[in-house]
């Protein structure tokens, strides 16, 4: 599974059994990893198909015109966008529920993820910046991390609370 | 209300009564309009405070939304921002006239549609604000995207939400509302050129619904 070859443009669509849940992924993609984490936490049986994101198969682009992973496929259902996939899994598969029941807490969690997505943009920018720009770029990331440090203190062992 | 002055830098945070739901907004902001549509659809009593987004009040960044954007909701000690989060929160907390489908797959499909609509708004802004040499590429892409939306609407019914407007419709409506103005400014028709008959009918249909009429910007 961790070493499963990635499907490239020249490949045929790997047949999908009826009823089976498949996630299109890439071993190093953090966004796909979001859904893999949810699948693992909730013990949802699934099959992983890795996609070569530098040379995408047509059959993959037909499923997600954005051409990104993760993508979920089961029978005639297709879901993509990492947050949408993760929420869909939490709603469809009961047990080990991952989303808070309280709407305000849920809203606060979504806002936190939004802040973190901005942090990752600055993180990638820092990695790609010119040597002279690096200190300022890192400082920007550090300032945003301070928010998360404060939130962990406030919330508990995890951003989700006790678990 | 549509002529309410916007709070600027140097102003003081207007006091908020206990139990009152306040929305921080801006009359012309399409993102804030999403949440105002939800408030109108669900008849949720609220107080509107407009923010001057070109000269933001210090208190807005410091106490309400560090990202400095509208919409934001405030009630007692609760503060929420991000248009999608605000809209979903309202639908969950205020029952009645429910806007989100019960079926998780339909919910996912609707959210994916809103994501795809982001491509439409990208081209829309490229036409309005982008460089002239990018114009024809943006127009071509926008046209292609609108044709796809036209086809999708045909599958779904009178509204993207089906037989009646749902969250998905309110999340995309603000830009459809601005299309005629954009078409005039760039001197090209998109929605009304005869090739997107479903979308053209949809725009007329949406314009008639009470929530849209109560929120529409007085151009």
Image (tube, coloured by chain):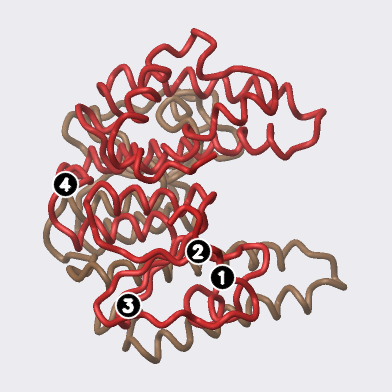
Instruction: Locate residue A55: give its quadrant.
Output: top right
SS assignment at label 2: strand
Query: Mark 4, residues whose alpha carbon is within 10 Å: few (<14), some, or many (≥20)?
Result: few
Outermost residue, right direction? A132
Q: Earlier in the sequence, mark 4 or mark 1?
A: 1
Distance between mark 3 and mark 1 Cα atoms: 21 Å
Percent from the top left, x then y, of residue A12? 43, 22
Task: Provide the residue designation for mark 1.
Answer: B7
Distance between mark 1 and mark 2 Cα atoms: 6 Å
Q: Are marks 4 and 1 on the same chain?
A: yes
Q: Earlier in the sequence, mark 3 or mark 4?
A: 3
Q: Please determine whether, in this image, residue A132 is positioned above or below residue A146.
A: above
Distance between mark 3 and mark 2 Cα atoms: 19 Å
Query: Mark 2, residues whose alpha carbon is within 10 Å: few (<14), some, or many (≥20)?
Result: many
Task: Provide the residue designation for mark 2.
Answer: B50
Q: Residue at x 47, y 34 (%)?
A: B177
Which chain is displayed in red in the rendered image? B
């Amino acid at each position: 599974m961790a070493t499963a070859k990635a499907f490239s443009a020249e490949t045929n669509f790997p047949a999908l059994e009826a009823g089976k849940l498949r996630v299109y992924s890439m071993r190093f993609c953090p966004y796909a990893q979001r859904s893999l984490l949810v699948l693992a936490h909730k013990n949802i049986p699934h099959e992983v198909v890795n996609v070569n994101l530098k040379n995408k198969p047509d059959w993959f682009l037909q499923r997600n015109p954005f051409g990104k992973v993760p993508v979920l496929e089961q029978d005639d259902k297709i879901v993509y966008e990492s947050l949408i996939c993760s929420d869909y899994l939490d709603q469809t598969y009961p047990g080990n529920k991952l989303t808070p029941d309280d709407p305000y807490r849920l809203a606060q969690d979504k806002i936190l993820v939004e802040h973190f997505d901005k942090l990752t943009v600055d993180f990638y920018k820092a990695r790609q910046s010119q040597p002279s720009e690096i200190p300022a770029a890192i400082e920007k990331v550090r300032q945003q991390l301070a928010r998360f440090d404060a939130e962990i203190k406030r919330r508990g062992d995890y951003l989700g609370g006790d678990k | 209300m549509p002529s309410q002055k916007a709070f600027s830098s140097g102003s003081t945070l207007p006091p908020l009564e206990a139990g009152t739901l306040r929305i921080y907004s801006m009359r012309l902001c399409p993102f804030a309009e999403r949440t105002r549509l939800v408030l109108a659809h669900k008849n949720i009593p609220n107080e509107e405070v407009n923010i001057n987004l070109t000269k933001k009040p210090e208190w807005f960044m410091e106490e309400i939304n560090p990202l400095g954007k509208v919409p934001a909701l405030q009630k007692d000690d609760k503060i929420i921002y991000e248009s999608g989060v605000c809209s979903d929160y309202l639908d969950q907390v205020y029952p009645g006239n429910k806007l989100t489908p019960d079926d998780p797959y339909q919910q996912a499909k609707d959210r994916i549609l809103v994501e795809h609509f982001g491509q439409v708004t990208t081209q829309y802004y490229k036409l309005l604000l982008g460089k002239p040499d990018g114009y024809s590429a943006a127009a071509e892409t926008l046209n292609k995207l609108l044709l796809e939306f036209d086809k999708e609407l045909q599958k779904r019914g009178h509204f993207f939400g089906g037989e009646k407007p749902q969250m998905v419709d309110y999340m995309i409506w603000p830009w459809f509302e601005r299309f005629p103005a954009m078409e005039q400014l760039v001197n090209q028709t998109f929605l009304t050129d005869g090739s997107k008959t479903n979308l053209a009918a949809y725009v007329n249909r949406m314009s008639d619904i009470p929530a849209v009429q109560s929120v529409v910007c007085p151009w």
